[in-house]
Image (cartoon, rainbow, N blue to C red):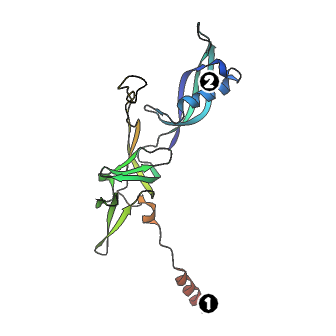
């Protein structure tokens, strides 16, 4: 789910950071620049892991800041396709089941990847697995807030492009830069509660203990 991405950048250290060591100021600026940001074709950046190389620093005419080329490794969220994850249902729509991991929300389990047969309940705004048992159908609801186990089936990166004048609400295209698509249409996947073993009744346990004593 998490990987180390090797990256490089030129970091501009402004004079207000000169009281720190170069390593400390670069660490601060890298996390400020990348943490909780999506890098195209890399993933969701979480935190700096380490700095592997710090090059020479340069100060250019008319600019009191130093510019330093840095190579580093960053912790990135990017699960591999076919990896199994556990999240929480954020909401349901006719499009499918929307899942969150707490720190990442752009996960969709589309209709064709739900357990079959399933239907969308308009009143509860939830998908329902019509589970067949003993010749009857039992409704298993996929309610918001439930823990769900799913398999990652694909990923998609979208480049956010400016579509309006800078500083306006339309300056950046409102599209998720990184999305995951998952599936639960196989045994063992879906709500965790579906696959939990039923708890044995305390009365049954006491009866068994009395029989053993006899």
Residue drawn at x 45%, y 57% as measured from the top left: 145
Question: Do the residues under discs 1 and 2 have CB atoms within 8 angstroms?
Answer: no
Residue drawn at x 55%, y 87% as measured from the top left: 207
> Is residue 171 rendered to the left or right of residue 206?
left
> Is residue 82 rendered to the left or right of residue 134?
right
Which element is circle 2 on?
Answer: strand
Query: How many C-alpha atoms fall within 10 Å of the one at disc 1: few (<14), some, or many (≥20)?
Result: few
* Residue 140 image-quadrant placement: bottom left
Asked if 179 appears above or below 99 in the picture, the reply is: above
Which mark, by number, is residue 213?
Answer: 1
Q: Position of residue 80 (x, y in %)?
A: 44, 43
Residue bearing the label numbered 2: 53
* Residue 71 image-quadrant placement: top right
Asked if 28 appears above or below 184 in the picture, the reply is: above
Which element is circle 1 on?
Answer: helix
| Camera-side residue of 2 and 94 | 94
Question: First in sequence: mark 1 or mark 2?
Answer: 2
Q: Position of residue 126 (x, y in %)?
A: 35, 58
Q: How many marks?
A: 2
Q: Position of residue 21 (x, y in %)?
A: 70, 24
* Residue 114 image-quadrant placement: bottom left
Residue drawn at x 67%, y 27% as measured from the top left: 24
Residue drawn at x 63%, y 21% as measured from the top left: 54
Disc 1 from disc 2: Cα separation:
71 Å
């Amino acid at each position: 789910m998490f990987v180390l991405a090797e990256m490089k950048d030129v970091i501009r250290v402004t004079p207000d950071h000169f009281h720190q060591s170069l390593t400390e100021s670069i660490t601060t600026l890298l996390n400020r620049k990348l943490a909780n940001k999506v890098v195209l074709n890399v993933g969701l950046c979480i935190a700096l892991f380490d700095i592997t190389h710090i090059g020479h620093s340069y100060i250019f005419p008319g600019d009191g800041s130093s510019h330093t080329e840095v190579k580093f490794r960053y912790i990135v969220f990017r699960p591999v396709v076919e990896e199994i994850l556990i999240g929480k249902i954020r909401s349901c729509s006719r499009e499918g089941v929307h899942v969150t991991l707490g720190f990442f929300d752009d996960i969709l389990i589309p209709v064709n990847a739900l357990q079959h047969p399933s239907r969308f309940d308009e009143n509860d705004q939830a998908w329902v697995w019509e589970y067949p048992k003993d010749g009857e159908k039992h409704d298993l609801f996929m309610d918001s807030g439930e823990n769900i186990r799913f398999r990652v089936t694909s990923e998609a990166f979208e480049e956010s492009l400016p579509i309006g004048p800078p500083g306006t609400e339309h300056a950046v295209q409102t599209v998720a830069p990184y999305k995951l698509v998952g599936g639960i249409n196989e045994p063992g996947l879906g709500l965790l509660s579906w696959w939990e073993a039923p708890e044995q009744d305390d009365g049954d346990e006491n009866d068994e203990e009395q029989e053993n004593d006899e």
